[in-house]
Image (spheres, rainbow, N blue to C red):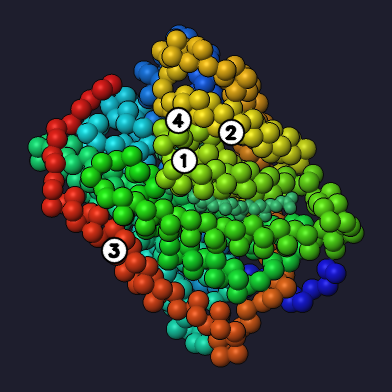
Amino acid sequence: PGAASTAARQAPPIADAAYLASLKKVTQYYVVTAFLALFVGVLIGPLQALNYGGINVYELPIIRNLLKSYYQGLSLHGVLNALVFTQFFISGWMLYLPVRDLGMRINMRFAWFTYALMTLGLLLAAVPLLTNRSTLLYTFYPPMQGDALFYIGAAIMVGSSLLVVGQVVNMWLRWKRENPGRVTPLVAFMSVSVWMMWAVASLGIVIEVVVLLIPWSLGLVGGVDPLLSKTLFWWTGHAIVYFWVLPAYISWYAFVPRHAGGRTVSEPLTRLTFVLFLLNSVPVGLHHQYSDPNISVLWKTLHMFLTFLIAVPSLLTAFSVTASLEDGARARGGRGLVGWVTKLPWGNAIFSAQVLAMISFILGGAGGIVNASSTFAGVVHNTAWIPGHFHITVGTATTLSFMGIALWLIPHLTGKRLPSMRLASWAVWTWFVGMMVFALGMHWQGLYGVTRRALVSATAQDVYRDMPIGLPVALTAISGVILLVSAILYFYVLFKMLLSKRVDNGEVSAPIPYSEKISPAGENLATAGKLVRYTEPLMALWLLTLVLVLMMYGPVLGRMIANLQLVPGWRLY
Ligand code: HAS
Ligand code: HEM
Ligand code: CU
C-alpha cells in the first residue's frame, strides 16, 4: 500500500521570472480581495445568528449607527460572502491553476485589466449597498427596486468573470493546438470545464440584469415582470452553487490526497464527474420555484428529476475522495474498517479544513435532496431550514475549503509563512463545530416553520411562543458566538501572514500539492481509454450543454415572455 503507481505531477517550470511574479501577484490580489469581503461579511453573521437565537442586537446604538436595518445587514452579508468572496477567490484560483498546470503564457495586461474591472464593478455596487439605497438581499427580486448603480456594478462584476472564462478557454485551445493528441492534464481539465459551465450558467443573471433591471431602474421602461426576472435569476442561481463548490472539488480530488499521503483514485472518473456537472448544473433551477404560480407542474417535475440526477456526480465524489483518504491513511499505518480515520493528519489545518468541509457537505447534500423533493419543499421552503442548508454547503463546504487552501496558497504566491499552525487549527475546528451547531439549530427551527429573512427576535416572539423551540433557539445563539471566535482567529492568522516578511518565492517551500494517481488517464489520446477520449472534446460538450439548457428552459421562459406582466418598482426600505 502507498506505493506510487505514477510519479506526482509537477507544474511545468516557468523560466520567465517576471511573468511568474506578475501571475502570482494578480492571483494574490484576487484572493486577498476575496478575504477582505469575507471579513466584513462574516462579522455580520453572528448578529443574525443572535437574532435566530432570540436576542435582538439591532437596537444597540453601535449597530444602529452602522446598519439602517436588519435587512441592510443581511444584504451586505449575502452579497459579500456568497457573491463577492466566492467570485474573487474562484477567479484567482481557477486562473492560476490551469495556467500553471499547462505551463502556458497568458497576456498579463488582460489579466490585470479583468481584475481591475471586476473590482470596479464591486466598488460601484458597494456604494448603494452601504448607503442603504439597494437593500434588496442577495437575490434582489423585483419588484423591489434599487439604484441603477447597484445593477450596473453587479453586471460589470459578473461580466468580468466572463473575461476570465475567455482567457482560460482561449489558453486551453492554444495548448490543444500546440499539443495535438495529448490528454489535457487533470487540474486544467477540471478548471476549464467549470469555467465553461459558468459561462452557460451566468447567462440567466446577465440577461436579467442587462435587459430587464438596468433599463427599469434607469426609468427607461415603466415596469418589470417579477416572475420572468426570478426565473432568469434561478437559471444562474442554482448553477452558481456548483460554481462555488467545484473549485473546492478541484482541490479535494487533486491536492487533498497529497496532504494525507494518499493518491487521487481515478483520473477518468474525475473527468466524468466534471463533465456531468457541465451538462446538468443549469437545467434544474425550478427547484427554487416550486411555490411560484404560472409555471406548469410538468416543468417543475422535470427539473426535480434533473436535480436528483445532478446529485450523482457529488456521490461519485464522496466515494472516490473517501477512497483516496483511506489510501493515504493505510499508507500511514491505518488499520481496521474505520480505524484508519485516526491516522489522517487532523492537526494539519490545510487538510482538516478541507476534510471537515467535506463532512459538513455530506449533511448539506442530504438536506439539499430534501429541499429538492417537491413533497418536502412546502415544509422547508422560506424557513430557517434553508439558511441551515446553505451554511453547511457554501458557508462551510466552500468557505472552509477555501480557508484551508489559502493556508498553502498564500505562502505559495507570496513566499511568506503561516505564522501558527496551532491557531489556524483552532480556527478551522471552531468553524466546523460552530457551523454544525448553527445548522442543527436552524434546520430544527425551520421544521417548526420559523421563517427565514426576518427579525424574528423583535417582531415574531408571540407567533412562536407556544412552540417547543427553546433548545434550537439557544443552540443558534451559541453557534453565533463560536463562529465569531473562529472568524477572529482565522483572520488574525491570515492578516498576520499577509503582513509578515517575504522569505522566498514560494516555489520550493510551498509547491502546488499535486497528488499521485492510482488510475491515471495517460498522456496520449490515441492510447487512452474510452472515458478519457469521450470527455476530452470539451468544446463540443459545451455546445451540447447549451442545447440541453435551452430545451429545459426555452418553453418555460417562452410562455412568460408571451404573457409579460409588467409591474412598477417598490422601495420598502
Ligand atoms: Fe442547495 C437552496 C437543493 C447543493 C447552496 N442551496 C440553496 C440555497 C443556497 C444553496 C445558497 O432543491 C439558498 C438559495 C436562497 O437564498 O433561496 N442543493 C440542493 C441539492 C444539492 C445542493 C439537491 N446547495 C448545494 C451546494 C450549495 C448550495 C453545493 C453551495 C455551495 N438547495 C437545493 C434546493 C434549494 C436549495 C431545492 C431551494 C430550497 C428552497 O425551498 O428555497 C446537491 O448538489 C447536493 C449533492 C451533494 C451530496 C453530498 C456529497 C458529499 C460529498 C462529501 C463527501 C465527504 C468526504 C469526507 C469525502 C450528495 C462530496 C469523508 C471523510 C472522512 C473522514 C473519511
Ligand atoms: C444568511 C449567519 C457566514 C452566506 C444568514 C442567516 C444567518 C447567518 C443567521 C439567516 C438570516 C435570515 O434568514 O434572516 C451566519 C454566521 C456566519 C455566516 C453566524 C459565520 C460567522 C456565512 C458565509 C456565507 C454566508 C461564510 C457564504 C460564503 C449567507 C447567505 C445568506 C446568509 C447567502 C442569505 C442572505 C439572504 O437571505 O438574503 N447567515 N452566516 N454566511 N448567509 Fe450567513
Ligand atoms: Cu438550487
Q: Is there CB contact under 8 Å for labels 2 and 4?
A: no
- Of the numbered discs 2 and 3, the one sitting upstream in the chain is 2
Q: CA distance from mark 2 to mark 4?
A: 13 Å
Towards the viewer: 155 or 226: 226
- Of the numbered discs 2 and 4, the one sitting upstream in the chain is 4
Q: Secondary structure at mark 4?
A: loop
Residue type pointed to by label 2: Ala
The residue that label 3 is drawn on is 550
Ligand 1 has an atom within 8 Å of the beta carbon of the residue at disc 4: no
Q: Is residue 407 above or below residue 182?
A: above
Ligand 3 has an atom within 8 Å of the beta carbon of the residue at disc 3: no
The residue that label 1 is drawn on is 376
For the residue carrying disc 4, how many other residues have a C-alpha within 10 Å: few (<14), some (14-19), or many (20+)? many
As drawn, is 318 to the left or to the right of 352? Answer: left
The residue that label 2 is drawn on is 439
Q: Is there CB contact under 8 Å for labels 1 and 2?
A: no
Q: Is residue 562 above or below residue 187?
A: above
